[in-house]
Every structure is written in C-alpha cells, then in structure tokens.
Image (spheres, rainbow, N blue to C red):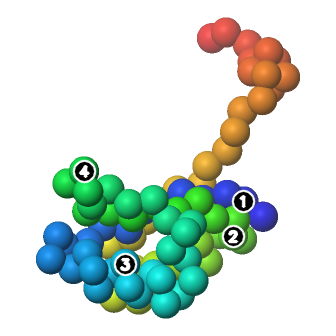
C-alpha cells in the first residue's frame, strides 16, 4: 500500500460540524487541524491502495474539495545513488 497525505478544507463556520463528523467516523485522533491558526483544513496521513481510496476518510459532503497526495520518504541509500544532472 502507498501512503497519502489527505487535505480537506472546510468553511470556518462549519468547524464544529466537521470535527464532530470526523469524530463519529473514528478518525479524530488521526487528524491534524489548522483551524486554531486560521487555516480551516484537516490533514491526515493514511495508507491506501490509491488516491480514491484515501479520500474515503473525508466526509462525503467535503470530499469534492479534498485532495490526496501520494507521499514517500527518501532514505540515504536512495539519495546517494542519485546522479547529479
């Protein structure tokens, strides 16, 4: 499985409703929130088969504006083998 960073924006007035929905889904402790810093988004890292599957953590009402980005960690051995261009 691949790892994805899922980002889900929401309107400032919907914070409580969105957080309660995420809580009901059981993902509350997996999410990081920007609301207290004025950035009304939630982020979660998840393992999934693909982007579409990763987006299932987002409540359906917010899924259209959410995005899932495949993420990787580079290890030192990989970087050492890279040739300078």
The image's mark for residue 2 is 1
**Image height check: is 39 above or below 77?**
below
Q: Quadrant of the C terminus?
A: top right
Q: Earlier in the sequence, mark 3 or mark 2?
A: 3
- The mark closer to the camera, 1 or 4, is 4
Q: Is residue 16 left or right of residue 21?
A: left
Considering only order in the chain, which callout, 4 or 2, is on the residue closer to the N terminus? 4
**Which residue is labeled 2 in the image?**
48
Q: Compared to 49, does 34 lie above or below?
A: above
Closer to the eye: label 3 or 1: 3
Q: Is residue 48 above or below residue 60?
A: above
- The crowding category of the residue bearing disc 1, from other C-alpha atoms within 10 Å (few below 14, some 14 to 19, many at least 20), is few
Q: Callout 4: helix, strand or loop?
A: helix
Question: Within the image, what quadrant is residue 13 found in?
Answer: bottom left
Q: Is the Cβ of the residue at disc 3 closer than 8 Å to that at disc 2?
A: no
Of labels 3 and 4, earlier in sequence is 3
Q: Residues within 10 Å of mark 4 (few under 14, many from 20)?
A: few
**Measured from the top left, where is residue 70 in percent x and y?**
60, 55
Q: Are marks 3 and 1 in contact (CB under 8 Å)?
A: no
Q: Which circle's residue, 2 or 1, is located before the other in the chain? A: 1
Residue at the disc numbered 4: 37
- Tag 1's secondary structure? strand
Q: Measure the C-alpha gap from mark 3 to mark 4.
A: 15 Å
- In percent of width and height, residue 58 lies at 46, 79
Please name the residue shown 32% across and 62% down the image.
Answer: 41
Q: Which residue is mark 3?
A: 19
Residue 51 seen by the camera: no
Q: Earlier in the sequence, mark 1 or mark 4?
A: 1
Residues marked 2 and 1 touching at CB (< 8 Å): yes
């Amino acid at each position: 499985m691949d790892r994805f960073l899922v980002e889900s924006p929401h309107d400032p007035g919907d914070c409580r409703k969105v957080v309660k929905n995420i809580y009901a889904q059981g993902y509350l402790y997996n999410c990081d929130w920007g609301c207290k810093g004025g950035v009304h988004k939630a982020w979660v890292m998840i393992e999934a088969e693909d982007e579409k599957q990763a987006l299932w953590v987002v409540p359906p009402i917010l899924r259209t504006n959410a995005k899932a980005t495949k993420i990787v960690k580079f290890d030192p051995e990989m970087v050492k083998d890279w040739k300078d261009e």
